[in-house]
Amino acid sequence: MSHDPLANDPLANKKQAWSALFSEPMSELVKRYTASVGFDQRLWRADIDGSLAHAAMLQAQGIIGADDLAAIQRGMAQIVADIEAGRFEWKLELEDVHLNIEARLTTLVGDAGKRLHTGRSRNDQVATDVRLWLRGEIDKINLLLVDMQRALVDLAAQHTDTVMPGYTHMQVAQPVSFAHHLLAYVEMFSRDAERLQDVRKRTNQLPLGAAALAGTSYPLDREAVARALGFDGVCQNSLDAVSDRDFALEFSAFATISMVHVSRLAEEIVLWMSQNFGFIDLADRYCTGSSIMPQKRNPDVAELARGKSGRVVGHLMGLITLMKGQPLTYNKDNQEDKEPLFDTVDTLSDTLRIMAEMVGGISVKKEAMERAALKGYATATDLADYLVKKGLPFRDAHETVAHAVKIAIQRGVDLAELPLAELQTLNASITADVAEVLTLRGSLNARQVSGGTAPVQVRAQIERHRQRLAA
Ligand code: ARG
């Protein structure tokens, strides 16, 4: 098989015009405007895997010969080697990753390359490629979510007895353990992981066989291709198969929610590290300095993680708007799904990785946390609960404690520092055992309800998470 490469390249005439139908070549500007190869070459491996599975099925169904399949496999192996070695020449005039690889294949192996596209269109091809590629990224992100949860659980395990103020309205509310606070984020990231598995199910369906939009007259075995590529099933309507991008929207929504969780954690890290809180310190390798203020160590990584959530939110809006109003079936609009999707994957992956590492480098200033918890009358609810146990209706107890807090504020002391006699003037049933109730640890230990901040409960949660994450 030796031939003039151009004669064997069905797309060579594209350098002139698309096909015999066209009387003039595409303008340079249009070429650049419509080309996607600059970014979609990232899909090359999925594109080749999809083509190899399609070709093997075509051969098994007797649509192409065994020699054609062997030639396609040989050519693709060469292309993989060239791309991996950075030797592959991506051509703008060949528009996208699909046409670039197919043209190169035909140059390498001749007619067999021209047979590959039998029963297939770039419409079902690109939908397949994006799903295959995204599935791989989903599996990697799932591991990053596990790492993130493990980092938080490991830090939490050291701090089930470290007391900090719990806040509502950013005002000191009740004491909680630092471990309990961290485990709130573990819950968020574990929900993200569940959502991601749900997205994976609908991503992992095979569009190939839909061809341009209506299906194909060749006796394709779609189930065999699905099995070969590890898909869970095949898309059941050819029109939907080529036009559906729900999986990308769902992934983007998942990523947005997860970045919002990261952003909330990042914001707390920034606050906790500020001099006004002084609750934690970050390892130097996660901080940057200032070019003018020599004293500064800034939590840039956390700030960037918070900031980068903006672009992921933006991509979700972009993708949803991209799909809105598109008539069935494939429209070139869909080419615009890739850059936001790629950037979403990259941003989320990098952010999860760096935040998990950074959490591992947090050092905790227990005394500062505890001092802050002592400031805002955080045990006032405990005093009210104490009075309820003595027989007072809760609303009356609430009012009584408000008086106690007022006195404490006037004296500039904590509730625990008010003399017993003083408390007894507010309610005679208060006795010496109130002292324990008014301490931070007494307050923590009292919250034994499941899901509460008592160290026993929190330790049980840590154990549950460890088992779940080991699986
Ligand atoms: N580059 C295109 C995309 O990303 C591939 C599909 C093009 N199909 C077509 N009929 N123009 O969507």
Image (cartoon, rainbow, N blue to C red):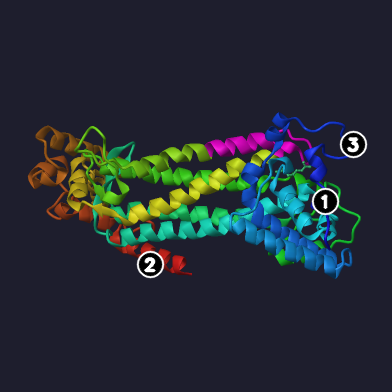
**Residue 391 horizontal/vertical position (percent):** 26, 50
Q: Which residue is mark 2?
A: 463
Q: Is residue 159 magenta?
A: no
> Does 284 sit left or right of 95 as displayed?
left
**Residue 97 horizontal/vertical position (percent):** 69, 48
Measured Cα–Cα span from mark 3 to mark 2: 69 Å
The residue positioned 23% from the left and 38% from the top of the image is 296
Is label 3 within 8 A of ligand 1 (CB to nearest ligand atom)?
no
Specify whether residue 202 is in view.
no
Q: Which residue is mark 1?
A: 211
User: Which residues are the magenta region?
Assistant: 313-334
Q: Which residue is mark 3?
A: 21
Q: Residues within 10 Å of mark 3 (few under 14, many from 20)?
A: few
Specify whether residue 321 is in view.
yes
| Amino acid at circle 3 | Leu
| 279 over 52 or under it: above or below | above
> Does 190 sit left or right of 451 as displayed?
right
